[in-house]
């Protein structure tokens, strides 16, 4: 009986987050009220507040869900077999495409991102650390099999993420979408060159 | 006589821009009025309008001046003697430090940057192209003397600028100032590694 209640509660939390994300995408974060979310779910606002004590808590839950999906996709690529350089390319491309789909174009989720970066920085920081750790794993695999030269793996991963800012950072993706610059694959080539082993005499 | 008039006019334009920049820094672009600028100069607003037909034109002039100083400093480094890698490091550092000084911290010029990027994009684009061209010159020198491997110099320069976004882009400098990430020198090391010649067998 307890388990059924738990499942139902988890299910309700999940449905609240799905509806909230949909409204944040369509109407924008600022304009969406808890009453709007409750109405779509045919619940009372008081019932929504039983699961999330504020709109900010819903925001937090939606952000975690969206970021968690990217983290899961990244980890799946990190754990797959195959050459590290090829998987690093796939990993960097996937992060770019998932972040673009989420936060750019018709979607109004960029508003949510801006708020997360200001008011809920810890959730963004944890996400970036998770992504950097997965990138670090692939770099470490490449360093171990001689594909890469990376004496300091965490640093190489941080530099890789920083070099990809135009393609990772939601605000930069949106701002640069119609601006001149390297293509995603050209930028990944440049990053892979930075990780490639040096020739004999040179450092 | 014509020359004296021209000099005086150029001088007045210059003084208007200096005062406008000072007020944009201190009060912010939005809050500064043409009347404020005129008051500091002990001129009538009508006289200021003789030189700049709108506040936007003053904004444009201030932006060009600030960007022109960075372009001049970059070109001086590009034209100096010495190893290309060392000059590229100095060039990338100088751009970062000059942009930080201009647009971050106490200065309210970031507001002006945001407006320039939305309303006066051409001036930003021309500036980025100028900086990329100077970086391209130094990369070409390094490619010619064997310090770098860069079969496509304009692309290598674009990738270098893109990789440095965290340290070049005013909004990113401001946003990342207290965030974890590589240091400026670590990031430049990563970029230089991307430009370094590959060992014999590898591409």
Image: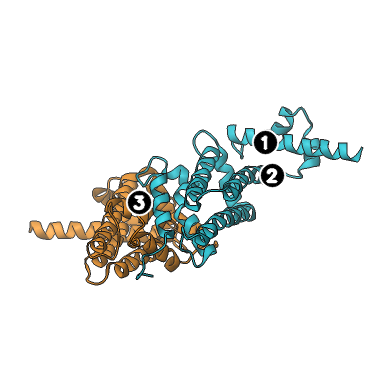
Chain colours: A cyan, B orange
Q: Mark 3 highlights which residue?
A: B34
Seen in the image, is B181 located left or right of residue B153?
right
Return the x and y of residue B194 as percentages of the image width and height: 38, 59
Return the x and y of residue B142 as percentages of the image width and height: 26, 63
Tell me if residue A40 comes above or below residue B71 in the rendering.
Answer: above
Count the labels in the image: 3
- Whichever of labels 1 and 2 marks the residue nearer the N terminus, that label is 1
User: Which of the pair A95/B174 is nearer the observer?
Assistant: A95
Q: Which mark is residue A28?
A: none
Q: Is residue B126 visible?
A: yes
Tell me if residue A74 comes above or below residue B83 in the rendering.
Answer: above
**Which is in the foreground here, disc 3 or disc 2?**
2
User: Which of the pair B48/A41 is nearer the observer?
Assistant: A41
Seen in the image, is B10 located left or right of residue A86?
left
Q: Quadrant of the N terminus of chain A?
A: top right
Marks 1 and 2: same chain?
yes
Return the x and y of residue B6 as percentages of the image width and height: 14, 57
- Determine contact: label 1, label 2, CB under 8 Å: yes
Residue A54, located in which quarter of the rendered image?
Answer: top right
Q: Mark 2 highlights which residue?
A: A61
Mark 3–mark 2 distance (CA, rounded to whole Å): 47 Å
Seen in the image, is A136 located left or right of residue B33?
right
Q: Mark 1 highlights which residue?
A: A20
Q: Residue furthest left?
A: B1
- Chain under disc 3: B
User: Which of the pair B83/A203 is nearer the observer?
Assistant: A203
What secondary structure is marked by label 2? helix
């Amino acid at each position: 009986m307890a388990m059924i209640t738990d499942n139902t509660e988890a299910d309700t939390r999940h449905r609240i987050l799905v509806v909230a994300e949909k409204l944040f995408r369509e109407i924008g974060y600022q304009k969406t009220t808890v009453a709007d979310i409750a109405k779509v779910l045919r619940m009372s606002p008081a019932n929504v507040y039983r699961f999330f004590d504020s709109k900010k808590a819903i925001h937090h839950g939606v952000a975690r869900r969206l970021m968690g999906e990217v983290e899961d996709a990244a980890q799946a690529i990190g754990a797959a077999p195959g050459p590290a350089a090829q998987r690093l390319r796939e990993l960097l491309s996937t992060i770019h495409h998932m972040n673009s789909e989420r936060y750019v174009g018709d979607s109004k989720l960029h508003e949510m991102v801006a708020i997360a970066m200001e008011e809920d920085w810890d959730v963004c920081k944890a996400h970036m650390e998770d992504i950097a750790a997965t990138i670090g794993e692939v770099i470490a695999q490449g360093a171990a099999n001689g594909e890469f030269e990376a004496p300091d793996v965490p640093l190489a991963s941080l530099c890789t993420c920083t070099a990809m800012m135009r393609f990772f950072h939601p605000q930069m993706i949106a701002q640069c979408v119609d601006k001149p610059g390297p293509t995603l694959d050209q930028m990944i080539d440049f990053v892979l060159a930075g990780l490639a082993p040096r020739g004999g005499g040179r450092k």
